[in-house]
Amino acid sequence: MPYKEFTLDDIARHHKEGDLWIVIDSKVYDLSRFADLHPGGAGVLYAEGIAGKDATQVFFGLHRLEVLQRPQYARLQIGAVRGQTETIKPLSPGELSLVPYAEPTWLTPGYFSPYYSDNHRKFHKAMRAFLMEVVQPEAVQCEENGKRISQEVVDKLSEINFLAMRLGPGKHLKGLTLMGGIVKPEEYDYFHELILNTEIARFGTRAFVDGLLNGGVIALPPVLNFGTLEQRAKFVPDILAGKKYISLAVSEAFAGSDVSGAQTVAVRDGDEWIVTGTKKWITNGTFSDYFTTLCKTDTGFVVLLVERSDAVSTKPVKTSYSSTAGTAFVTFDKARVPVANTLGQVGKGMSIVLSNFNHERWMVTATSLGAQRLVVEECLKWTNQRIAFGKPLHAQAVIRAKLATMISRVETCQAWVENITHQMNNMSYQEQSDKLAGPIALLKQFVSKAGRETAEDATQIFGGRGITVTGMGKVIENYHRTSPFDAILAGAEDVLGDLGVRQAIRRMPKNARL
Ligand SMILES: Cc1cc2nc3c(=O)[nH]c(=O)nc-3n(C[C@H](O)[C@H](O)[C@H](O)COP(=O)(O)OP(=O)(O)OC[C@H]3O[C@@H](n4cnc5c(N)ncnc54)[C@H](O)[C@@H]3O)c2cc1C
Protein backbone atom coordinates (compact mmCIF):
# COMPACT_ATOMS: atom_id res chain seq x y z
CA MET A 1 0.00 0.00 0.00
CA PRO A 2 1.47 3.42 -0.89
CA TYR A 3 2.36 5.81 1.94
CA LYS A 4 -0.52 8.28 2.42
CA GLU A 5 -2.45 10.42 4.86
CA PHE A 6 -5.56 9.28 6.71
CA THR A 7 -8.15 10.97 8.89
CA LEU A 8 -8.85 9.59 12.35
CA ASP A 9 -12.27 8.49 11.04
CA ASP A 10 -10.62 6.49 8.22
CA ILE A 11 -8.41 4.77 10.76
CA ALA A 12 -11.23 4.01 13.19
CA ARG A 13 -12.90 1.76 10.60
CA HIS A 14 -9.98 -0.71 10.77
CA HIS A 15 -10.50 -2.20 14.20
CA LYS A 16 -11.09 -5.92 13.83
CA GLU A 17 -9.38 -9.22 13.14
CA GLY A 18 -7.92 -9.25 9.63
CA ASP A 19 -8.30 -5.48 9.33
CA LEU A 20 -6.41 -3.74 12.11
CA TRP A 21 -4.79 -0.32 12.07
CA ILE A 22 -3.35 1.69 14.94
CA VAL A 23 -1.67 5.07 15.34
CA ILE A 24 1.59 5.65 17.18
CA ASP A 25 2.91 9.20 17.32
CA SER A 26 1.07 10.33 14.17
CA LYS A 27 2.12 7.25 12.16
CA VAL A 28 -0.45 4.76 10.94
CA TYR A 29 0.46 1.07 11.16
CA ASP A 30 -1.40 -1.77 9.48
CA LEU A 31 -1.20 -4.68 11.93
CA SER A 32 -3.71 -6.93 10.13
CA ARG A 33 -1.15 -9.62 9.33
CA PHE A 34 1.22 -8.90 12.18
CA ALA A 35 -1.37 -9.27 14.96
CA ASP A 36 -0.93 -13.04 15.28
CA LEU A 37 2.83 -12.58 15.46
CA HIS A 38 2.68 -9.93 18.21
CA PRO A 39 4.90 -11.22 21.05
CA GLY A 40 2.38 -9.93 23.60
CA GLY A 41 -0.49 -11.82 21.91
CA ALA A 42 -3.04 -10.66 19.33
CA GLY A 43 -5.82 -10.11 21.85
CA VAL A 44 -4.36 -6.96 23.37
CA LEU A 45 -4.26 -5.30 19.96
CA TYR A 46 -8.02 -5.60 19.51
CA ALA A 47 -8.73 -3.93 22.85
CA GLU A 48 -10.87 -0.83 22.99
CA GLY A 49 -8.66 2.25 22.83
CA ILE A 50 -6.11 0.46 20.66
CA ALA A 51 -7.71 -1.08 17.57
CA GLY A 52 -8.33 1.72 15.10
CA LYS A 53 -7.17 4.30 17.65
CA ASP A 54 -4.18 6.36 18.72
CA ALA A 55 -2.28 3.85 20.88
CA THR A 56 0.76 6.05 21.51
CA GLN A 57 0.45 6.12 25.29
CA VAL A 58 -0.20 2.40 25.63
CA PHE A 59 2.63 1.59 23.24
CA PHE A 60 5.22 3.60 25.15
CA GLY A 61 4.04 2.15 28.44
CA LEU A 62 5.26 -1.19 27.10
CA HIS A 63 7.90 -0.61 24.44
CA ARG A 64 11.04 1.37 23.73
CA LEU A 65 11.15 3.74 20.78
CA GLU A 66 13.78 1.59 19.09
CA VAL A 67 11.16 -1.13 18.53
CA LEU A 68 9.46 1.08 15.94
CA GLN A 69 12.75 1.56 14.14
CA ARG A 70 13.39 -2.12 13.57
CA PRO A 71 12.88 -2.83 9.87
CA GLN A 72 10.29 -5.56 10.49
CA TYR A 73 8.10 -3.10 12.39
CA ALA A 74 8.96 0.07 10.48
CA ARG A 75 7.62 -1.51 7.31
CA LEU A 76 4.19 -1.93 8.90
CA GLN A 77 3.72 1.83 8.63
CA ILE A 78 1.31 2.67 5.83
CA GLY A 79 0.96 6.39 6.29
CA ALA A 80 0.39 9.24 8.72
CA VAL A 81 -2.54 10.97 10.37
CA ARG A 82 -3.60 14.04 8.41
CA GLY A 83 -2.60 17.23 10.23
CA GLN A 84 -0.35 15.49 12.77
CA THR A 85 3.45 15.36 12.86
CA GLU A 86 5.84 12.97 14.51
CA THR A 87 7.09 14.28 17.88
CA ILE A 88 8.98 11.35 19.41
CA LYS A 89 12.36 10.93 17.76
CA PRO A 90 15.63 9.27 18.74
CA LEU A 91 18.64 11.49 19.32
CA SER A 92 20.68 12.00 16.19
CA PRO A 93 24.40 11.22 16.56
CA GLY A 94 26.05 13.85 18.75
CA GLU A 95 22.76 15.42 19.85
CA LEU A 96 22.20 16.32 23.51
CA SER A 97 19.28 14.96 25.48
CA LEU A 98 16.79 17.51 26.77
CA VAL A 99 15.63 15.26 29.60
CA PRO A 100 16.54 17.05 32.85
CA TYR A 101 19.76 15.70 34.41
CA ALA A 102 20.40 13.45 31.42
CA GLU A 103 23.39 15.64 30.65
CA PRO A 104 25.85 17.18 33.10
CA THR A 105 25.41 20.87 33.91
CA TRP A 106 28.17 21.95 31.56
CA LEU A 107 26.22 20.52 28.62
CA THR A 108 22.88 21.93 29.70
CA PRO A 109 21.87 25.15 27.92
CA GLY A 110 21.83 28.14 30.25
CA TYR A 111 24.14 26.60 32.88
CA PHE A 112 27.84 27.14 33.51
CA SER A 113 31.01 25.32 34.51
CA PRO A 114 34.52 26.59 35.26
CA TYR A 115 36.15 23.46 33.85
CA TYR A 116 35.24 23.14 30.18
CA SER A 117 36.33 25.14 27.14
CA ASP A 118 34.80 25.43 23.68
CA ASN A 119 37.28 22.79 22.59
CA HIS A 120 35.85 20.35 25.14
CA ARG A 121 32.38 21.03 23.73
CA LYS A 122 33.50 20.41 20.17
CA PHE A 123 35.32 17.29 21.27
CA HIS A 124 32.26 16.05 23.15
CA LYS A 125 29.97 16.52 20.19
CA ALA A 126 32.30 14.72 17.81
CA MET A 127 33.01 11.92 20.28
CA ARG A 128 29.34 11.29 21.00
CA ALA A 129 28.52 11.20 17.29
CA PHE A 130 31.44 8.87 16.57
CA LEU A 131 30.53 6.50 19.39
CA MET A 132 26.85 6.41 18.46
CA GLU A 133 27.60 5.70 14.83
CA VAL A 134 30.64 3.44 15.02
CA VAL A 135 30.65 1.83 18.45
CA GLN A 136 27.11 1.60 19.80
CA PRO A 137 25.76 -1.01 17.33
CA GLU A 138 28.77 -3.24 18.01
CA ALA A 139 28.58 -2.61 21.78
CA VAL A 140 24.97 -3.78 21.90
CA GLN A 141 25.70 -6.86 19.79
CA CYS A 142 28.86 -7.91 21.63
CA GLU A 143 27.30 -7.37 25.05
CA GLU A 144 24.68 -9.88 24.00
CA ASN A 145 26.70 -12.47 22.09
CA GLY A 146 29.84 -12.21 24.23
CA LYS A 147 32.18 -11.82 21.27
CA ARG A 148 35.20 -9.56 21.50
CA ILE A 149 35.30 -6.21 19.75
CA SER A 150 35.80 -6.65 15.99
CA GLN A 151 39.01 -5.67 14.24
CA GLU A 152 36.93 -3.50 11.92
CA VAL A 153 35.78 -1.32 14.81
CA VAL A 154 39.25 -1.35 16.39
CA ASP A 155 40.63 -0.03 13.10
CA LYS A 156 38.11 2.81 13.14
CA LEU A 157 39.00 3.55 16.76
CA SER A 158 42.65 3.63 15.80
CA GLU A 159 41.96 6.21 13.09
CA ILE A 160 40.93 8.71 15.78
CA ASN A 161 43.67 7.44 18.15
CA PHE A 162 41.08 6.31 20.63
CA LEU A 163 43.33 4.13 22.82
CA ALA A 164 45.99 6.83 22.97
CA MET A 165 43.31 9.23 24.21
CA ARG A 166 42.05 6.70 26.77
CA LEU A 167 45.54 6.78 28.28
CA GLY A 168 45.15 10.47 29.10
CA PRO A 169 47.35 13.43 28.31
CA GLY A 170 51.08 12.88 27.88
CA LYS A 171 54.04 12.37 25.60
CA HIS A 172 52.48 9.30 23.98
CA LEU A 173 50.11 11.67 22.12
CA LYS A 174 52.92 13.56 20.40
CA GLY A 175 52.53 13.61 16.64
CA LEU A 176 49.13 11.89 16.69
CA THR A 177 45.96 13.28 15.11
CA LEU A 178 43.33 13.11 17.81
CA MET A 179 39.64 12.88 16.97
CA GLY A 180 40.28 13.97 13.39
CA GLY A 181 42.34 16.95 14.57
CA ILE A 182 39.64 18.52 16.77
CA VAL A 183 42.03 18.62 19.70
CA LYS A 184 45.79 19.07 19.46
CA PRO A 185 47.93 16.60 21.44
CA GLU A 186 49.28 19.41 23.65
CA GLU A 187 45.71 20.67 24.33
CA TYR A 188 44.33 17.27 25.26
CA ASP A 189 43.72 17.15 29.01
CA TYR A 190 42.01 15.00 31.62
CA PHE A 191 38.66 16.68 30.93
CA HIS A 192 38.83 15.43 27.34
CA GLU A 193 39.51 12.00 28.74
CA LEU A 194 36.68 12.37 31.25
CA ILE A 195 34.34 13.16 28.36
CA LEU A 196 35.52 10.09 26.47
CA ASN A 197 35.07 7.85 29.51
CA THR A 198 31.59 9.07 30.39
CA GLU A 199 30.46 8.77 26.77
CA ILE A 200 31.55 5.14 26.32
CA ALA A 201 29.39 4.19 29.28
CA ARG A 202 26.17 5.54 27.80
CA PHE A 203 25.01 2.44 25.93
CA GLY A 204 24.04 0.25 28.88
CA THR A 205 26.75 -2.23 27.92
CA ARG A 206 29.05 -2.44 30.95
CA ALA A 207 31.19 -5.38 29.85
CA PHE A 208 31.80 -3.83 26.46
CA VAL A 209 33.21 -0.75 28.20
CA ASP A 210 35.98 -3.06 29.41
CA GLY A 211 36.09 -4.88 26.09
CA LEU A 212 36.78 -1.50 24.47
CA LEU A 213 40.54 -2.01 24.90
CA ASN A 214 40.48 -1.42 28.63
CA GLY A 215 43.34 -3.88 28.98
CA GLY A 216 45.50 -1.36 27.16
CA VAL A 217 44.34 1.51 29.35
CA ILE A 218 45.64 -0.22 32.47
CA ALA A 219 48.55 -2.23 31.02
CA LEU A 220 50.29 0.38 28.88
CA PRO A 221 51.07 3.04 31.52
CA PRO A 222 53.85 0.94 33.10
CA VAL A 223 55.39 0.65 29.62
CA LEU A 224 55.00 4.38 28.96
CA ASN A 225 56.14 5.51 32.40
CA PHE A 226 58.81 2.95 33.24
CA GLY A 227 59.79 1.39 29.90
CA THR A 228 63.01 2.27 28.08
CA LEU A 229 63.03 4.10 24.76
CA GLU A 230 63.64 0.80 22.98
CA GLN A 231 60.77 -0.92 24.77
CA ARG A 232 58.40 1.92 23.98
CA ALA A 233 59.46 1.98 20.34
CA LYS A 234 59.07 -1.78 20.05
CA PHE A 235 55.68 -2.27 21.70
CA VAL A 236 53.66 0.94 21.95
CA PRO A 237 52.99 1.91 18.29
CA ASP A 238 51.37 -1.41 17.35
CA ILE A 239 49.22 -1.39 20.46
CA LEU A 240 48.06 2.19 19.93
CA ALA A 241 47.35 1.32 16.29
CA GLY A 242 45.10 -1.56 17.33
CA LYS A 243 47.34 -4.18 15.74
CA LYS A 244 48.33 -5.78 19.03
CA TYR A 245 46.53 -6.09 22.37
CA ILE A 246 47.81 -5.89 25.91
CA SER A 247 46.50 -6.75 29.39
CA LEU A 248 47.51 -6.00 32.95
CA ALA A 249 48.24 -9.24 34.80
CA VAL A 250 48.54 -8.45 38.50
CA SER A 251 45.71 -10.22 40.34
CA GLU A 252 45.85 -13.89 41.21
CA ALA A 253 43.57 -16.31 42.95
CA PHE A 254 46.00 -15.86 45.84
CA ALA A 255 46.34 -12.09 45.64
CA GLY A 256 43.65 -9.54 44.82
CA SER A 257 43.35 -6.71 47.33
CA ASP A 258 46.61 -7.85 48.85
CA VAL A 259 48.74 -7.49 45.72
CA SER A 260 51.88 -8.34 47.67
CA GLY A 261 50.60 -11.90 48.03
CA ALA A 262 51.29 -12.54 44.32
CA GLN A 263 52.94 -15.91 43.76
CA THR A 264 53.83 -15.81 40.08
CA VAL A 265 57.58 -16.29 40.05
CA ALA A 266 60.27 -15.01 37.68
CA VAL A 267 63.65 -16.72 37.82
CA ARG A 268 66.66 -15.43 35.91
CA ASP A 269 68.28 -17.76 33.39
CA GLY A 270 70.97 -15.89 31.47
CA ASP A 271 69.32 -13.27 29.26
CA GLU A 272 65.87 -14.53 30.08
CA TRP A 273 63.37 -14.71 32.89
CA ILE A 274 61.46 -17.94 33.35
CA VAL A 275 57.95 -17.06 34.50
CA THR A 276 55.72 -19.57 36.24
CA GLY A 277 52.34 -18.93 37.81
CA THR A 278 48.74 -17.92 37.17
CA LYS A 279 46.76 -14.68 36.99
CA LYS A 280 43.01 -14.33 37.41
CA TRP A 281 40.30 -12.01 36.00
CA ILE A 282 42.61 -10.43 33.44
CA THR A 283 40.62 -7.99 31.30
CA ASN A 284 41.00 -8.55 27.51
CA GLY A 285 43.26 -11.46 28.45
CA THR A 286 41.48 -13.93 26.18
CA PHE A 287 42.75 -12.03 23.14
CA SER A 288 45.82 -10.12 24.32
CA ASP A 289 49.24 -10.51 22.73
CA TYR A 290 51.13 -9.04 25.70
CA PHE A 291 50.74 -9.16 29.47
CA THR A 292 52.18 -6.52 31.80
CA THR A 293 52.85 -8.99 34.56
CA LEU A 294 53.75 -8.62 38.23
CA CYS A 295 56.20 -11.34 39.28
CA LYS A 296 58.06 -12.25 42.42
CA THR A 297 61.86 -12.62 42.27
CA ASP A 298 64.60 -13.36 44.80
CA THR A 299 65.13 -9.63 45.17
CA GLY A 300 61.56 -8.33 45.31
CA PHE A 301 58.84 -7.78 42.74
CA VAL A 302 59.40 -7.04 39.07
CA VAL A 303 57.07 -6.09 36.21
CA LEU A 304 57.69 -7.97 32.97
CA LEU A 305 56.17 -7.58 29.56
CA VAL A 306 55.32 -11.18 28.72
CA GLU A 307 54.48 -12.03 25.12
CA ARG A 308 51.90 -14.69 24.29
CA SER A 309 53.58 -17.97 23.38
CA ASP A 310 53.00 -21.70 23.72
CA ALA A 311 53.98 -21.32 27.37
CA VAL A 312 51.29 -18.66 27.96
CA SER A 313 47.73 -19.91 27.84
CA THR A 314 44.46 -18.12 28.53
CA LYS A 315 40.95 -19.31 29.15
CA PRO A 316 37.79 -17.30 29.76
CA VAL A 317 36.58 -16.65 33.30
CA LYS A 318 32.79 -16.66 33.32
CA THR A 319 31.68 -13.66 35.37
CA SER A 320 28.23 -12.13 35.65
CA TYR A 321 28.98 -9.65 32.91
CA SER A 322 29.37 -10.46 29.22
CA SER A 323 32.46 -12.30 28.01
CA THR A 324 32.95 -9.49 25.48
CA ALA A 325 35.32 -8.05 28.13
CA GLY A 326 37.63 -11.00 27.49
CA THR A 327 38.15 -11.70 31.21
CA ALA A 328 40.77 -14.45 31.41
CA PHE A 329 42.61 -16.87 33.61
CA VAL A 330 46.22 -16.74 32.45
CA THR A 331 48.75 -19.51 32.97
CA PHE A 332 52.49 -18.96 32.57
CA ASP A 333 54.11 -22.36 32.27
CA LYS A 334 57.85 -21.67 32.40
CA ALA A 335 57.36 -18.85 29.91
CA ARG A 336 60.70 -17.50 28.69
CA VAL A 337 60.79 -13.70 28.70
CA PRO A 338 63.78 -11.69 27.47
CA VAL A 339 65.42 -9.65 30.22
CA ALA A 340 65.02 -6.78 27.76
CA ASN A 341 61.28 -6.93 28.56
CA THR A 342 61.82 -5.88 32.19
CA LEU A 343 59.84 -2.71 32.94
CA GLY A 344 61.63 -0.47 35.43
CA GLN A 345 63.93 -1.83 38.09
CA VAL A 346 63.91 -5.27 39.62
CA GLY A 347 62.62 -4.89 43.17
CA LYS A 348 60.45 -1.86 42.29
CA GLY A 349 57.59 -3.85 40.78
CA MET A 350 55.17 -3.10 43.57
CA SER A 351 55.54 0.67 43.35
CA ILE A 352 55.14 0.50 39.55
CA VAL A 353 51.87 -1.37 39.96
CA LEU A 354 50.61 0.86 42.76
CA SER A 355 51.38 4.09 40.89
CA ASN A 356 49.27 2.77 38.04
CA PHE A 357 46.16 2.46 40.18
CA ASN A 358 45.23 6.15 40.45
CA HIS A 359 44.43 6.61 36.79
CA GLU A 360 42.60 3.29 36.58
CA ARG A 361 40.45 4.09 39.62
CA TRP A 362 39.64 7.56 38.35
CA MET A 363 38.67 6.04 35.00
CA VAL A 364 36.26 3.64 36.70
CA THR A 365 34.57 6.58 38.45
CA ALA A 366 34.20 8.35 35.10
CA THR A 367 32.59 5.40 33.34
CA SER A 368 30.36 4.80 36.35
CA LEU A 369 29.30 8.44 36.18
CA GLY A 370 28.27 8.09 32.52
CA ALA A 371 26.31 4.95 33.31
CA GLN A 372 24.57 6.45 36.35
CA ARG A 373 23.45 9.45 34.33
CA LEU A 374 22.02 7.17 31.68
CA VAL A 375 20.12 5.28 34.39
CA VAL A 376 18.68 8.55 35.72
CA GLU A 377 17.54 9.47 32.20
CA GLU A 378 15.96 6.06 31.69
CA CYS A 379 14.10 6.36 35.00
CA LEU A 380 12.82 9.87 34.26
CA LYS A 381 11.51 8.74 30.88
CA TRP A 382 10.01 5.53 32.23
CA THR A 383 8.20 7.15 35.15
CA ASN A 384 6.79 9.68 32.71
CA GLN A 385 5.46 7.13 30.23
CA ARG A 386 4.45 4.21 32.45
CA ILE A 387 0.87 4.42 33.65
CA ALA A 388 -0.10 2.54 36.81
CA PHE A 389 -3.27 3.06 38.85
CA GLY A 390 -4.40 5.43 36.11
CA LYS A 391 -1.47 7.85 36.53
CA PRO A 392 2.13 8.15 35.40
CA LEU A 393 4.48 6.49 37.87
CA HIS A 394 5.96 9.84 38.84
CA ALA A 395 2.61 10.82 40.32
CA GLN A 396 3.61 8.62 43.27
CA ALA A 397 5.55 10.47 45.97
CA VAL A 398 7.64 7.40 46.75
CA ILE A 399 8.83 7.27 43.14
CA ARG A 400 9.65 10.98 43.15
CA ALA A 401 11.64 10.51 46.35
CA LYS A 402 13.70 7.80 44.66
CA LEU A 403 14.30 10.04 41.66
CA ALA A 404 15.38 12.88 43.94
CA THR A 405 18.01 10.69 45.57
CA MET A 406 19.24 9.28 42.27
CA ILE A 407 19.63 12.75 40.77
CA SER A 408 21.40 14.04 43.88
CA ARG A 409 23.80 11.10 43.80
CA VAL A 410 24.80 11.54 40.19
CA GLU A 411 25.23 15.30 40.58
CA THR A 412 27.37 14.77 43.69
CA CYS A 413 29.52 12.21 41.88
CA GLN A 414 29.87 14.57 38.92
CA ALA A 415 31.03 17.46 41.10
CA TRP A 416 33.59 15.34 42.93
CA VAL A 417 34.90 13.65 39.77
CA GLU A 418 35.31 17.05 38.11
CA ASN A 419 37.14 18.43 41.14
CA ILE A 420 39.61 15.52 41.13
CA THR A 421 39.99 15.82 37.35
CA HIS A 422 40.89 19.48 37.81
CA GLN A 423 43.56 18.48 40.35
CA MET A 424 44.96 15.91 37.90
CA ASN A 425 45.13 18.57 35.20
CA ASN A 426 47.30 20.70 37.45
CA MET A 427 49.61 18.05 38.90
CA SER A 428 52.53 16.07 37.53
CA TYR A 429 52.31 12.26 37.52
CA GLN A 430 54.51 12.25 40.65
CA GLU A 431 52.33 14.80 42.43
CA GLN A 432 49.22 12.83 41.52
CA SER A 433 50.76 9.67 42.99
CA ASP A 434 51.63 11.53 46.15
CA LYS A 435 48.59 13.71 46.69
CA LEU A 436 45.69 11.99 44.96
CA ALA A 437 45.94 8.32 45.93
CA GLY A 438 43.77 8.92 49.01
CA PRO A 439 41.21 11.26 47.43
CA ILE A 440 40.82 9.03 44.35
CA ALA A 441 40.38 5.96 46.55
CA LEU A 442 37.62 7.73 48.52
CA LEU A 443 36.07 9.04 45.31
CA LYS A 444 35.92 5.58 43.79
CA GLN A 445 34.39 4.12 46.93
CA PHE A 446 31.74 6.84 46.94
CA VAL A 447 30.92 6.66 43.23
CA SER A 448 30.64 2.87 43.09
CA LYS A 449 28.45 2.84 46.22
CA ALA A 450 26.26 5.56 44.73
CA GLY A 451 26.04 3.53 41.54
CA ARG A 452 24.86 0.41 43.33
CA GLU A 453 22.28 2.34 45.34
CA THR A 454 21.04 3.93 42.12
CA ALA A 455 20.90 0.48 40.50
CA GLU A 456 18.67 -0.73 43.35
CA ASP A 457 16.36 2.28 43.12
CA ALA A 458 16.14 2.00 39.34
CA THR A 459 15.27 -1.68 39.58
CA GLN A 460 12.39 -0.92 41.94
CA ILE A 461 11.19 1.84 39.62
CA PHE A 462 11.23 -0.47 36.60
CA GLY A 463 9.68 -3.44 38.40
CA GLY A 464 9.81 -6.73 36.48
CA ARG A 465 11.35 -4.97 33.51
CA GLY A 466 14.30 -3.96 35.67
CA ILE A 467 15.28 -7.60 35.92
CA THR A 468 14.41 -8.55 32.34
CA VAL A 469 17.35 -8.69 29.96
CA THR A 470 15.63 -7.37 26.84
CA GLY A 471 13.05 -4.67 26.23
CA MET A 472 12.08 -1.63 28.23
CA GLY A 473 14.31 -2.25 31.24
CA LYS A 474 17.37 -3.62 29.46
CA VAL A 475 19.65 -0.76 30.51
CA ILE A 476 18.57 -1.07 34.12
CA GLU A 477 18.96 -4.84 34.12
CA ASN A 478 22.47 -4.51 32.72
CA TYR A 479 23.41 -1.84 35.23
CA HIS A 480 21.90 -3.69 38.18
CA ARG A 481 23.81 -6.84 37.24
CA THR A 482 27.09 -5.10 36.48
CA SER A 483 27.35 -2.13 38.86
CA PRO A 484 29.13 -4.35 41.44
CA PHE A 485 32.02 -4.58 38.97
CA ASP A 486 32.81 -0.92 39.62
CA ALA A 487 32.95 -1.76 43.32
CA ILE A 488 35.54 -4.52 42.83
CA LEU A 489 37.74 -3.78 39.80
CA ALA A 490 40.79 -1.61 40.42
CA GLY A 491 40.40 -2.05 44.16
CA ALA A 492 37.48 -3.20 46.28
CA GLU A 493 35.26 -0.49 47.73
CA ASP A 494 36.01 -1.17 51.41
CA VAL A 495 39.72 -1.47 50.81
CA LEU A 496 39.72 1.89 49.02
CA GLY A 497 37.73 3.64 51.74
CA ASP A 498 40.25 2.38 54.24
CA LEU A 499 43.16 3.47 52.06
CA GLY A 500 41.73 6.98 51.75
CA VAL A 501 41.36 7.39 55.49
CA ARG A 502 44.79 5.90 56.23
CA GLN A 503 46.33 8.40 53.83
CA ALA A 504 44.51 11.23 55.60
CA ILE A 505 45.67 10.01 59.01
CA ARG A 506 49.24 9.90 57.73
CA ARG A 507 48.96 13.59 56.86
CA MET A 508 47.55 14.71 60.18
CA PRO A 509 49.61 17.60 61.58
CA LYS A 510 51.51 16.43 64.65
CA ASN A 511 50.10 19.28 66.72
CA ALA A 512 46.46 18.82 65.73
CA ARG A 513 44.34 18.82 68.88
CA LEU A 514 40.75 19.60 69.74
C1 LIG B 1 35.79 -8.63 35.83
C2 LIG B 1 37.09 -8.40 36.51
C3 LIG B 1 38.14 -7.87 35.78
C4 LIG B 1 39.38 -7.69 36.38
N1 LIG B 1 40.43 -7.24 35.62
C5 LIG B 1 41.68 -7.28 36.14
C6 LIG B 1 42.82 -7.02 35.31
O1 LIG B 1 42.69 -6.71 34.13
N2 LIG B 1 44.04 -7.14 35.86
C7 LIG B 1 44.23 -7.48 37.17
O2 LIG B 1 45.37 -7.58 37.60
N3 LIG B 1 43.17 -7.71 37.99
C8 LIG B 1 41.91 -7.65 37.51
N4 LIG B 1 40.83 -7.92 38.31
C9 LIG B 1 41.04 -8.27 39.71
C10 LIG B 1 40.56 -7.22 40.69
O3 LIG B 1 41.46 -6.16 40.72
C11 LIG B 1 40.39 -7.91 42.06
O4 LIG B 1 39.26 -8.74 41.96
C12 LIG B 1 40.24 -6.93 43.17
O5 LIG B 1 41.45 -6.27 43.40
C13 LIG B 1 39.80 -7.60 44.49
O6 LIG B 1 40.56 -8.73 44.76
P1 LIG B 1 39.85 -10.12 45.13
O7 LIG B 1 38.73 -10.31 44.20
O8 LIG B 1 40.88 -11.18 45.19
O9 LIG B 1 39.24 -9.90 46.55
P2 LIG B 1 39.94 -10.22 48.01
O10 LIG B 1 41.25 -9.58 48.03
O11 LIG B 1 39.86 -11.68 48.23
O12 LIG B 1 38.95 -9.52 48.94
C14 LIG B 1 37.60 -9.94 49.09
C15 LIG B 1 36.84 -8.83 49.74
O13 LIG B 1 37.29 -8.69 51.07
C16 LIG B 1 37.30 -7.34 51.45
N5 LIG B 1 38.65 -6.97 51.89
C17 LIG B 1 39.83 -7.50 51.51
N6 LIG B 1 40.84 -6.88 52.13
C18 LIG B 1 40.30 -5.93 52.92
C19 LIG B 1 40.82 -4.92 53.78
N7 LIG B 1 42.13 -4.76 53.97
N8 LIG B 1 39.96 -4.11 54.42
C20 LIG B 1 38.63 -4.24 54.23
N9 LIG B 1 38.07 -5.15 53.42
C21 LIG B 1 38.89 -5.99 52.77
C22 LIG B 1 36.85 -6.52 50.25
O14 LIG B 1 35.50 -6.22 50.36
C23 LIG B 1 37.06 -7.46 49.10
O15 LIG B 1 36.16 -7.20 48.05
C24 LIG B 1 39.56 -8.02 37.75
C25 LIG B 1 38.48 -8.52 38.49
C26 LIG B 1 37.26 -8.72 37.89
C27 LIG B 1 36.15 -9.28 38.71
Image: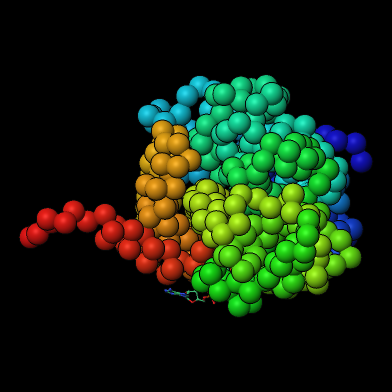
Q: Residue at x 86, y 51 (%)?
A: 72
How are the residues colored? rainbow
Residue 16 x %, y %: 81, 60
**Front-lying residue, 131 or 306:** 306
Q: Residue at x 45, y 42 (%)?
A: 430
Residue 5 x %, y %: 78, 34
**Front-lying residue, 423 or 445:** 423
Q: Quadrant of the N terminus?
A: top right
Query: Which image quadrant is residue 493 in?
Result: bottom left
Image vertical order of residue 390 relative to residue 8, above or below: below
In the picture as drawn, the residue positioned furthest to the left comes out as 514
Horizontal side of residue 345 vs 114, given as left or right: right
**Front-lying residue, 308 or 388:** 308
The answer to whether one can see residue 184 in this image is yes
Horizontal side of residue 349 vs 423, given as left or right: right
Query: Which image quadrant is residue 233 in?
Result: top right
**Front-lying residue, 314 or 147:** 314
Image vertical order of residue 277 relative to residue 72, above or below: below
Q: Quadrant of the C terminus?
A: bottom left
The answer to whether one can see residue 17 in this image is no
In the picture as drawn, the residue positioned furthest to the front comes out as 270
In the picture as drawn, the residue positioned furthest to the bottom comes out as 254
Residue 120 x %, y %: 53, 28
Horizontal side of residue 249 vs 374, given as left or right: right
The picture quadrant for ligand 1 comes to: bottom right
Image vertical order of residue 331 relative to residue 407, above or below: below
Residue 227 x %, y %: 65, 44
Total marks placed: 0
Q: Residue at x 78, y 40 (%)?
A: 234
